[in-house]
Image (cartoon, coloured by chain):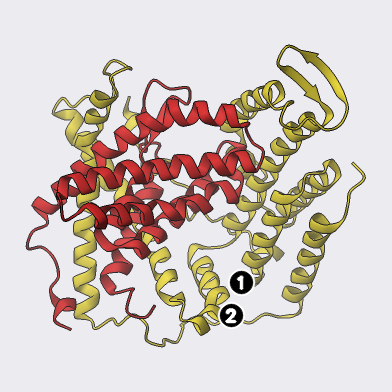
Chain colours: A red, B yellow
Amino acid sequence: MKGSLSVRNIVIAGVLGAVAILLGVTRLGYIPVPTAAGNATIMHIPAIIGGIMQGPVVGAIVGIIFGVSSFLNATVPLFKDPLVAILPRIFIGVVAWLVYVGIRRRSEYLAIGTAAFLGTLTNTVLVLTMAVIRGYMGAEVAWTVAITSGIPEAIVGTIVTLAVVLAWKQIGKGKKSKISEDL
Amino acid sequence: MASEFELSRNITIGQYVPTDSFIHRLDPRIKLLVFTILVLAIALNTSYLGNALGLLLAIYLFWASKIPISYGLSGIKPAIPFIIILAVLQLIFQGNVFSGGTVFFEYGFILITSESIRLVIVSAVRFVEIILLSSVLTLSTSTTDLTHAIQSLLSPLKKIKFPVHEISLIITIAIRFVPTFAIEMEKMMKAQASRGADFGSGEWWRIIQRTKDMLPIIIPLFNIALSRAEDLILAMESRCYTPGNDRSSYSVYQSIGRDYIVLVIGLLISALLLFYHFPF
């Protein structure tokens, strides 16, 4: 593990974790959409971006930070259960990374978009699965939520991730610290 | 309208109420450990009596830490409508899933059994318990203490090459940057709004439009975050920070008698909640 967490990985994970916490506590992470829940969350997007930019370890760590912060801030009993709030979130960044690496060679845009889409679906599916297992909702309710709120969320997630990653790739050129690459 | 842009006011992370009580003086490592085990035990307990015990314990801890319980209740207040709606939904739709026990009411697909009522009440009470417990922990422990505690609790994992120090550094960076980004966001939202930006007043069915409305704040937020990250990376690397090296700590915690007593009591209560079969 020693080599896998470079200074870059540590800092990016920390900073994206801060964004995830901020989106949650300021309610900016909720985009109002026409679903039963009324909101599509974008709080998992830092985890996806962490996965795409820095690999699965950073993605998983940002996911955990997002999970813990959603657990501590939760206003519904469902997310006051650590097994629902924290555990599924670990996999968001990992899935996003796997998808991104798998498709990257064909097209960068397609890879980022698909990674964001599937990363968001990972969040929805795993959280709802845990919710059903832990008895907060029945399977029918979960299916309804998955379709009515999961799909818009995945659309929103794809747009935001694409916009953020592409904007950063344009602006961030030449800004990167080169020291660690020399070491 | 102005309150829409007041982001930093709502942030309670790192909020700390210094009353110098018994709970405040406990070793943060022990506090965190007992808290984690208690929350897990409460999350897995499904009996009325067990959850009543948990609730009493949470209230007692508030009293013992001399923190006004209103701090804890302020976390519950906004949640009350959700709790009620969820309870009603669970009551109506969950009877078929948790069909054990006595059937009280049956009409069409609505089936209310003693087990589904138990589920509703227990999950509501469990929610209140966990909110109270986590507020006691965060209100009586400073962020620095918490991250140090996390680091030293995870330190046995160093044996399997788990990067404990790095993880706690990540947590510190994350918590440190939340207020900074909140201030930046405030500036940005005001700047965008003064140029006529419109946050989310498009028609509600146009998901893509509403997402696009948020982009003028979300993209700069990530960009600010990432460019600050680049600055920090450069600063750390130019000071020759090397991940994975052994470091000594400025503050060293020493557990004394009362810490161990609290640990034993916490473990006993958790074991009771986990393994004892409560009659109700």
**Chain containing mark 1:** B
Instruction: Say which of B167 and B208 sits in front.
Output: B208
Circle 1 — which element?
helix
* Whether residue A84 can be seen here: yes
Density class for disc 1 (Cα within 10 Å; few <14, some 14-19, many ≥20) is many
Q: Residue furthest left?
A: A174
Residue position marked by numbered label 1 in the rendering: B29
Given the image, on which type of amino acid does mark 2 rest? Tyr
- Residue B248 percent across, percent down from the top left: 45, 87
**Chain containing mark 2:** B
- Residue A80 percent across, percent down from the top left: 60, 44
Instruction: Say which of A151 and B244 sits in front.
Output: A151
Q: Is residue A140 above or below residue B67?
A: above
State the quadrant of the C terminus of chain B: top right
Instruction: Say which of B230 and B138 sits in front.
Output: B230
Residue A161, which numbered label?
A: none
Q: Is residue A90 above or below residue B253?
A: above
Q: Residue at x 50, y 53 (%)?
A: A68
Q: Residue at x 23, y 81 (%)?
A: B239
- Distance between the Cα atoms at labels 2 and 1? 8 Å
Given the image, on which type of amino acid does mark 1 rest? Arg
Q: Is residue B166 left or right of residue B132?
A: left
Circle 2 — which element?
loop
Does label 1 lie on the same chain as label 2? yes
Q: Residue at x 10, y 63 (%)?
A: A175
Instruction: Say which of B215 and A169 sits in front.
Output: A169
Residue position marked by numbered label 2 in the rendering: B253
Q: Which of pointers 2 and 1 lies earlier in the amino acid sequence?
A: 1
Q: Are marks 2 and 1 in contact (CB under 8 Å)?
A: yes
* Whether residue B199 can be seen here: no
**Total number of numbered discs in the rendering:** 2
- Residue A82 percent across, percent down from the top left: 59, 51
